[in-house]
Amino acid sequence: MIELQHLEKRYGDTWAVRDLSLVFPEGELTALLGPSGCGKTTTLRMINRLTEPSGGRVLLGGRDTRDFRPEDLRRGIGYVIQQIGLFPHLTVAQNVATVPDLLGWDRRRTARRVDELLALVGLDPPVYRAKRPGELSGGQAQRVGVARALAADPPVLLMDEPFGALDPLARDRLQEAFRGIQQRLRKTVVLVTHDIDEALRLGDRVALMRGGTLAQFGTPDDLIHRP
Ligand code: ADP
Ligand code: ADP
């Protein structure tokens, strides 16, 4: 479970996020929805402390994230962004193995895990293992990004517009694939999106932000039926 308590971020005179209190339930996907500039990305980056809050707290499993070592935050929180930033000179397998390599896993364990993850995201391991990012379509590259984020089996996954740069067909297919993955893995996921259809389709809950703060929180049904 992730809990935000009176979380704030200020840039000069601008409040990017203001007095935001919110619980992301364990094992559920919460869509963080709202128009551009409402504070979604800033909120997400304060959860893994890529952005340092100006005030308030983030609790992970009841523990203040300030008390985590940076490497434990990195291992415990997967992170997927729009332009996934695969290392172009590394193979697909080496990209997926980034975190296991940092953690010093032995080669056999890493290789097994890489194949398991490639299969999970719908990329046939023998075909894709040795490819370079330059040989992949946008949708395939995002799949590798999802596999990489899941490599060390983090309980929490943060996703910032992960389908945003894809053409509509690739987006649909990856959304469907991800829905299947989430039904199996039951991670605590926060998905940033400005796309209401995506939020309603993928979210167990939807947190609607406006002007740096929470406007509504509920299930997709709550949001559709409550004006
Ligand atoms: P969203 O993800 O909803 O588009 P952001 O969290 O990126 O919103 O931004 C929220 C507000 O904070 C915006 O007004 C944005 O311009 C501002 N902001 C975000 N990051 C910075 C930064 N590094 N420096 C200054 N202002 C920022
Ligand atoms: P998004 O794709 O979520 O809309 P942005 O384009 O708002 O992202 O932000 C991209 C990067 O620029 C982020 O690192 C953000 O923190 C930073 N940023 C956003 N707004 C500002 C701003 N007004 N001043 C400085 N940096 C900003």
Image: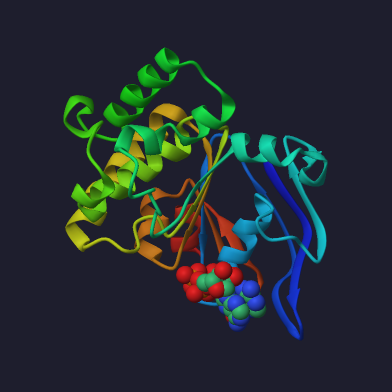
In front here: 190 or 215? Answer: 190
In front here: 28 or 153? Answer: 153
Tell me if residue 38 can be seen. no
Q: What residue lies at 22% left-to-right and 38% top-to-bottom?
A: 131
Q: Position of residue 76 (x, y in %)?
A: 62, 35
Occupied quadrant, residue 42: bottom right
Does residue 59 lie above or below 163 as drawn?
above
How many numbered markers are drawn? 0
Occupied quadrant, residue 50: bottom right
In front here: 60 or 26? Answer: 60
Tell me if residue 167 can be seen. yes
Work out which residue is located at the far bottom of the displayed protein and give it: 13
Q: What kind of colouring is applied to the model shown? A: rainbow
Q: Position of residue 186 (x, y in %)?
A: 48, 31
Q: What residue lies at 27% left-to-right and 48% top-to-bottom?
A: 133
Classify the position of the N terminus by image quarter: top right
* Location of ligand 2 given as a quarter of the image: bottom right
Q: Position of residue 8 (x, y in %)?
A: 76, 67
Q: What residue lies at 39% left-to-right and 66% top-to-bottom?
A: 195
Does residue 78 lie above or below 197 as drawn?
above
Residue 46 in the figure: left or right of residue 27: right
Residue 208 in the figure: left or right of residue 141: right
Q: What residue lies at 30% left-to-right and 38% top-to-bottom?
A: 91
Does residue 48 lie above or below 98 as drawn?
below
Does residue 35 lie above or below 90 as drawn?
below
Residue 203 in the figure: left or right of residue 42: left
Residue 18 in the figure: left or right of residue 28: right
